[in-house]
Image: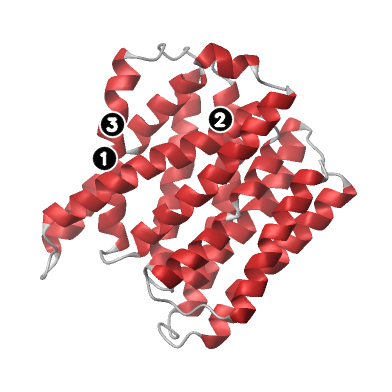
Amino acid sequence: MSDWLISLEGTADGKQLALILAIIAAFLHAVFGAIQKGRHDPWLTRGAVDISYCLMAAPFAFFVVPWPEPHMWPIFAGAWALHLIYKILQASAYSRGAFTVVFPVVRGTGPLFAVIGAYLIFNESFTGTQWLGLVVLLAGIFGLAVYNLIYLQAERDTLPTALVLAVITGLFVALYTTYDAYAIRATADPFTFLAWFFFFDGLVMPVYALYRWRRMKDAPAPGPLMARGVIGGVLALASFGSIMLATRLDKVGEAAVLRETSTVFAAFIGWLVLKETVGPRRIALMALIAIGAVIVEMGG
């Protein structure tokens, strides 16, 4: 499969597959975000998710994929550090703000910085039409966040802090997206990066989650928490794996922008699952996000 994927790099078929993978990643990422914001403490959920995908990735890393080249070990260290900071910021934001406020800000800030990073590192550029699409998409995302901020009544006292954390988290989304796109291109086999990344990435947060769980006066039952973690682990593997393969097959900036249609999926999940209100104004803003993504893709 690795040889087949590598053969598609830079081709029309590769571009089409990258589009499909980016949209799949968007949907799965929205589901993943809702799981982390759901019934359990986000720190505990993050720990359960991380230990799940760490254990899932371990046999592939040690026994299936080719062993990493020597130059990959410091690259893995950089990816691990960026993702650890991102996860701490994300859990902190989710602890202070509603999912439908925090998530759009994180996802809206990310693609703008990612496009800039792709230009600086990979020499990628957007056409005028694509920049228009990005502006439309960002208008929808940030408009959705502002609307939610104005009308949401819960968690009002902690929302300003949550929004600041969300913007910083979005910056780290762009940093790890650009860095990981470089990392997955630095190894001959893309699945080598994915397997070892998930193994290393899942080693730290479970330790803190266990510490936090033991200190809780009313700690949740481990069974349902770990079940949520296993589901989240599968989603993380599929979502992150999809977007990373998309960045290897096609432009990093386009994949990063298309992934942010996750905000549309997240709003519907917030309405259907988390019982958060969705009205005509929010539907119109979500339509802007989708339209912007279409313009970016068709303008390339």
Count of numbered circles on the image:
3
| Disc 3 to disc 2, C-alpha distance | 19 Å
- 10 Å neighbourhood of mark 1: few (<14), some, or many (≥20)? many
Residue 259: where, in percent of width, then height?
Answer: 59, 48
- Residue at mark 3: 56
Residue 245 is marked as 2
Nearer-the-camera pick, 69 or 240: 240
| Disc 1 to disc 3, C-alpha distance | 6 Å
Residue 12: where, in percent of width, then height?
Answer: 74, 26
Please determine whether, in this image, residue 39 is positioned above or below residue 88: below
Residue 54: where, in percent of width, then height?
Answer: 29, 34
Q: Residue at the spot x=25%, y=57% of the render?
A: 44
Please determine whether, in this image, residue 84 is positioned above or below residue 242: below
Q: Which tag, 1 or 2, sits closer to the chain's start?
A: 1
- Residue at mark 1: 52
Query: Answer yes or no: do the residues labelled 1 and 3 have beta carbons within 8 Å?
Result: yes
The amino acid type of the residue labelled 1 equals: Ser
Can see residue 48?
no
Residue 219: where, in percent of width, then height?
Answer: 13, 65
Residue 65 is marked as none
Q: Which tag, 3 or 2, sits closer to the chain's start?
A: 3
Q: Quadrant of residue 204?
A: top left
Question: In this rendering, would 122 be left or right of 128?
Answer: left
Q: Residue at the spot x=60%, y=76% of the render?
A: 282
Check disc 3 and report its element: helix, strand or loop: helix
Q: Residue at the spot x=61%, y=80% of the render?
A: 280
| Disc 1 to disc 2, C-alpha distance | 21 Å
The amino acid type of the residue labelled 2 equals: Leu
Check disc 2 and report its element: helix, strand or loop: helix
